[in-house]
């Protein structure tokens, strides 16, 4: 692994943490800060796994590590078939990395989870193709993945919302205000479906 580690720190929320997955998870105040997670991983990850430094993203529940794999060998024609072959080869390379590094990734994740009290998820990038392996889905009135949770945490940390639930409600209201015309059309289409369903045969007619 060469180059410097790229970390994406998400402000105060990344250090405070949240309740861990499931019952008996750690309380927010009990979470250790993860401000040195990028540096720790830069020393812990094996050399040669990735081209350059992986991207490390941290929030209150999860640390996501995504690294760039070595480029594919050989040339692929700039045709529909060639592009499909390139995509298939990239998928195969990512799958091979996932399988051959599984045991070591599990051990690194175990150590990181013990150190930072956050779940660890992995991903790999090859060209334009990116695949995330098992990642956390955290309940916040609904299940959201890390990018969506970061949006909510930003609203909370900036004082726009008091909590994630409040931030989610704020976001829904905002979408409703700016998508009123589209939502009106959607409701009209749903009403037409209901009308057609009502006019159709019922089980008693069969």
Image: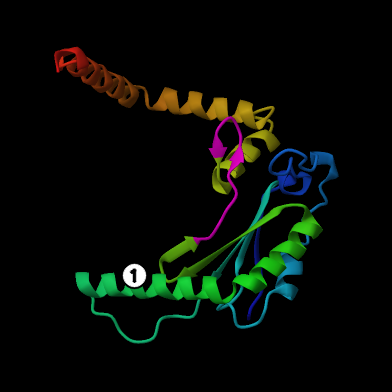
Residue 68 in sight from this viewpoint: no
Q: Decide whether residue 21 is among the magenta residues.
A: no
Dot 1: few (<14), some (14–19), or many (≥20) neighbours within 10 Å?
A: some
Q: Is residue 91 above or below residue 177?
A: below
Residue pictured at 15% horizontal, 17% vertical = 200
- 106 relative position to 146: left or right: right
Q: Which residues are magenta?
A: 132-143
- 55 relative position to 91: left or right: right
Q: Nearer the viewer, residue 131 or 24?
A: 24
Residue pictured at 37% horizontal, 27% vertical = 179
* Image quadrant where one finds the C terminus: top left
Q: Nearer the viewer, residue 160 or 122?
A: 122
* Image quadrant where one finds the N terminus: bottom right
Q: Is residue 162 above or below residue 139?
A: above
Location of residue 159 in the rendering, given as x and y in whole percent from the top left corner? 69, 31
Q: Nearer the viewer, residue 167 or 141?
A: 141
Mark 1 = which residue?
Answer: 87
Q: Secondary structure at mark 1?
A: helix
Q: Is residue 153 above or below residue 163?
A: below
Locate residue 186: give its quadrant.
Answer: top left
Location of residue 175 in the rendering, given as x and y in whole percent from the top left corner? 45, 28
């Amino acid at each position: 692994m060469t180059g410097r580690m790229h970390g994406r720190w998400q402000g105060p929320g990344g250090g405070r943490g949240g309740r861990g997955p499931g019952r008996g998870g750690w309380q927010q105040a009990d979470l250790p800060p993860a401000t040195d997670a990028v540096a720790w991983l830069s020393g812990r990850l094996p050399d040669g796994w990735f081209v350059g430094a992986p991207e490390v993203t941290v929030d209150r529940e999860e640390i996501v590590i995504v690294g760039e794999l070595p480029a594919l060998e050989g040339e692929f024609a700039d045709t529909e078939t060639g592009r499909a072959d390139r995509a298939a080869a990239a998928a195969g390379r990512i799958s091979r990395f996932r399988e051959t590094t599984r045991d070591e990734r599990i051990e690194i994740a175990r150590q990181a989870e013990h150190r930072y009290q956050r779940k660890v998820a992995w991903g790999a990038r090859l060209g334009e193709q990116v695949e995330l392996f098992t990642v956390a889905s955290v309940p916040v009135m609904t299940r959201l993945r890390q990018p969506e949770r970061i949006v909510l945490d930003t609203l909370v940390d900036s004082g726009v919302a008091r909590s994630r639930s409040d931030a989610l409600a704020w976001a829904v209201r905002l979408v409703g205000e700016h998508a009123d015309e589209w939502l009106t059309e959607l409701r009209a289409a749903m009403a037409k479906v209901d009308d057609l369903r009502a006019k159709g045969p019922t089980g008693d007619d069969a």
